Image (tube, rainbow, N blue to C red):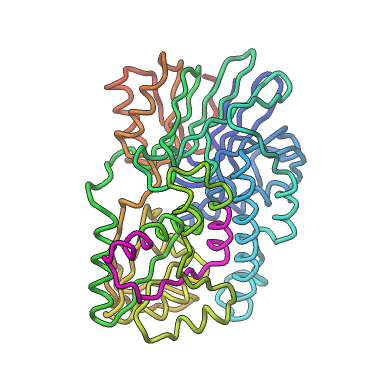
Amino acid sequence: MKIRFLGAADTVTGSRHLVETDGQRLLLDCGLFQGFKTWRERNWQPFPVPPGSIDAVLLSHAHLDHSGYLPALVKQGFRGRIWCSAPTRDLAEVLLLDSAHLQEEDARRANRRGFSRHAPALPLYTVADAKKAIARLEPVAPGRSVKLGAVSATFTPVGHLLGACAVTLRGPGGSLVFSGDLGRDDDLLMPAPQKIAQADVLLVESTYGNRLHPREDVQARLGAIVRETVRRGGSVLLPSFAVGRAQALLLVLQRLKAAGEIPAEVPVFLDSPMAIAATTLYQRHRRALRIAPREATGLCDGVTLVERAQDSEKLTRARYPAVIISASGMATGGRVLHHLKAMAPNPRHHIVFPGFQVAGTRGAKLVEGAPDVKIFGEYVAVKAEVSHLEGFSGHADADGLLAWLRGFERPPRQTFVVHGETAASDALRSRIADQLGWRVAVPEHASEVTP
């Protein structure tokens, strides 16, 4: 067995792990790099092996840092199947089409306004490329094995996001488990991650490898923010991941209104076609959620769904207090940028980031207290209040990661800590070595190992 760490090694983004075993070349995840420019530039580099030589992709879940490079891989010659759970297949279709659309729009805007150094600016991939990748997605039921030559692949639900699964590869050369992103035991929407008994080789994520979730009641805190902001005549902007986070926010806002903790008359807008489509998918797959079916079907009760771009533009000019959920979650693109540009200079408003922010993104800069932020090629002053609600994160924290690892019946022969910033990955490595006594390492980007 040989593993090449082509992404999410030395960073928390761009998940791509190439496994060569028993005559198969298999890619675990195929994500976009996000965050710092030096990371994003990796998206434009040729794939390290000919994509046509890859037999299959095993997709842990639909978030773009795990799935967003698939259209580029297909564009470069990949012709195999992309295996994933059924909900992941449905969500990936929404996410990939939206990603392609945004990239086309960003390229057009850059060419029109001349703020790109490239002439002409081009998208990484197009909507047509995304459709070709989507056609290769193959759903598989959790617990059912897929035969890939001499290797079998099995998907195990791990919370975090609708459809998210760990991937287990088994063959004559041994077994490998890839955790994907692990969810929380107390997630608002998703059940706790299922344990896995055995692995010869383990790849485990470390997004929260060096910290614990704050002991805060996120519903109570968000309620207090909305009440105070509305009292002073401002609006609350929630930059949100369209898939997972937006649905959790809708759930909490419904519960706050039902409990009378925020005014029932305060309008709530869901300004993201992708989040609207994803919410429909959450309702369709509601049996996979931990909430009651009636709560799932009622997520959008009384919520104004903003589908058209012109209605979103009108919303940026609105003067009355409101709660606006808009994508993207780290303010890297999408409609939320127009709301940020309109709201950031006004101290009455409150910008609330519900969840993890990758270093180098606009969201991370705002959370860190940046006095201004660059949007559409110009700097915008930040006078609005900015808050960070880490309690909305869908990732297991350091203790949660250790608890999941303790579910293995015996230590893996080798464990690799991936998908984390340097400090987080090394902190988890240290805890695994000290508390579990396992053989563990943090791989470098583009490194190759034969465990």
Q: Compare residues 292 and 76 and report the one nearer the observer.
A: 292
Q: Tell me what residue is drawn at x 46 percent, y 69 percent.
A: 303
Q: Residue at x 61, y 61 (%)?
A: 98
**Above/below status of 305 relative to 284:** below
Residue 147, how many percent across, how many down?
71, 24
Magenta stretch holds residue 277: yes
Between 429 and 137, which is closer to the camera in this rendering?
Answer: 137
Residue 216 visible? The answer is: yes
Q: Position of residue 45 (x, y in %)?
A: 62, 50
Residue at the limit of the structure toward the front, as seen here: 294
405 drawn magenta: no
The answer, for residue 11, to whether it is visible in the render is no
Q: Position of residue 294 (x, y in %)?
A: 47, 53
Corner quadrant of residue 277: bottom right
Pinpoint residue 414: horizontal percent, then vertical percent: 45, 19
Q: Is residue 345 left or right of residue 290?
A: left
Quadrant where the N terminus is found in the figure: top right
Relative depth, front residue between 141 and 433: 141
Residue at the (30%, 79%) spot, across then down: 234
Q: Is residue 86 above or below residue 148?
A: below
Read off the magenta span: 253-281
Picture layout, residue 444 above or below residue 421? above
Q: Is residue 103 left or right of residue 134?
A: left
